[in-house]
Amino acid sequence: MTEQQADSFAAAHALLAELIEGDYRNRTEDPDDPSTVQAMQLALNLPKQDPPARNQVLTDAARAVVAVCLDERAGSEGFWREHLAAWYSHRIRKVARRARNKAWDNVQVLPGVTVGTARAFVPSATNEVPPAIAKLQIKGTELEDSTTTPIVTEGPLLLIDASLTMSLGKAAAQVGHASMLYAAALPLEKARAWAKTGFVLSVREVDPEAFAKCSGHPNAVVVRDAGYTEVAPGSVTVVALPPGTAPIS
């Protein structure tokens, strides 16, 4: 990493860290001003033949979201930083959409980061979503394969409350929220070290008892949902735990 890249990363992290100062959940939108209704769009590559496992998609989505937030382009003036700043200053919405075949290929040229089966895009006002993204279906096929990838020791463990029975798209948005909040809570040098691993992390969907136990960990980063879709307002959907702290295998 060059000195300029290091400075850009620090600036991107500082911008993200501002998100958790105060209660970001109380930030507002004005339906009469569409520019205030901001969202990060997520495209999930779900081909009909040989679809990926649900756990793989969730892991990829979480990594892609934080990669957008801490991309070096977020650390210098311009499109990327301006759009993130606008998103951070309002309610932190995410919209997950199903993509496959040519539709998946078409969105790769739009500003964002792809990790495996997921691409997270630079946020925008919801009335300014690029057509190639807007035409992707929000409700898509669920994945039956729940095979889990091995837990990596270098990154956080994101735990989902399985009792909420969230759809793939909803769960992808929630783990994405967890990864960015986790990064925001890290000291700069620890965030930089995590970035050098490619933001490696693990995801597990666990029963309510295990979830409640981990939610009470002193180092847990907790995601409470606003309740727009699928779950009740204030529901704790995901917790992120630092490496080596979770009693989950």
Image (tube, rainbow, N blue to C red):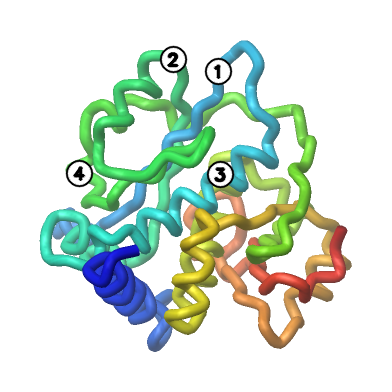
x 32%, y 44%: residue: 112
Please, what is the three-letter code of the amino acid marked with disc 1? Pro
Instruction: Provide the residue designation for mark 3.
Output: 60
Mark 1 touches mark 3? (CB < 8 Å): no
In the rendered image, the quadrant that contains the N terminus is bottom left
The image shows residue 235 at horizontal and vertical percentages of 63, 66
x 79%, y 71%: residue: 246
Instruction: Provide the residue designation for mark 4.
Output: 127
Instruction: Provide the residue designation for mark 1.
Output: 47
Instruction: Provide the residue designation for mark 2.
Output: 101
Q: Is residue 86 above or below residue 99?
A: below
The image shows residue 181 at horizontal and vertical percentages of 49, 71
Helix, strand or loop at label 2? It is: helix
The image shows residue 185 at horizontal and vertical percentages of 50, 80
x 39%, y 45%: residue: 120
Mark 3 or 4, nearer chain start: 3
Question: Label 2 to label 1, Cα distance in Å?
Answer: 7 Å
Residue 156 visible = yes
Question: Label 4 to label 2, Cα distance in Å?
Answer: 25 Å
